[in-house]
Amino acid sequence: MTKILTRIGAIPAVITGSLLVPKMVLAQAFQDALDRVGDVGGEAGIDSTTELPELIGQIINIILGFLGIVLLLLILYAGFLWMTAGGDDDKVKTARQIIANSIIGLIIIVAAFAISNFVLGALVDITQ
């Protein structure tokens, strides 16, 4: 009976030890990771000295860049549809429509980029 109680008492100790050992071993690595978290914004070009209009401009540029990538993927997809149409007029028509809509979207994104750069540049000049 005592052997059973000893074994039962050893189970929580083993479980607790197995949970604490990785924490102790990885404590320094975790602390190093926490120390580097503050550098992420600086590496991305965003730090505490960045003014609000500049920060908004950076965020808008990131969003517009992402939309440009999406449009590029749409044009590639439409080109793939067109090349694999095999003479099917409906697929070619769909591909041409996707390409036309992508080009219109690209024009809108370039215009939005130009307008946002102009407006935010004027805001930065006014605030300085």
Image (cartoon, helix red, strand yellow):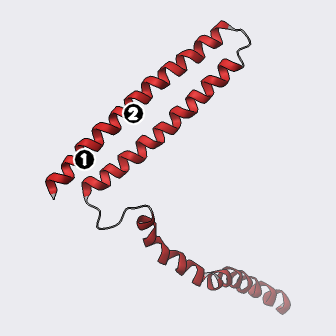
Residue 16 left/right relative to 47 = right
- Locate residue 107: give its quadrant: top left
In percent of width and height, residue 90 lies at 63, 9
User: Which type of secondary structure does the marked residue at label 2 adopt?
Assistant: helix
- Which mark identifies residue 55? none
Q: Which residue is mark 1?
A: 120
In percent of width and height, residue 115 lies at 28, 37
Residue drawn at the location 53% of the way across and 75% of the way down: 33
In percent of width and height, residue 2 lies at 83, 92
> Label 2 amino acid?
Ile
**Which of the two labelled residues, at mark 1 and mark 2, occupies the earlier sequence position?**
2
- Which mark identifies residue 109? 2
Residue 85, compared with residue 47, is above or below; it is above
Pick the residue in front: 14 or 28.
28
Residue 68, compared with residue 78, is above or below; it is below
Residue drawn at the location 25% of the way across and 56% of the way down: 52
Asked if marks 1 and 2 touch (Cβ < 8 Å), the reply is no
Q: For the N terminus, which image quadrant? A: bottom right
Pick the residue in front: 41 or 107.
107
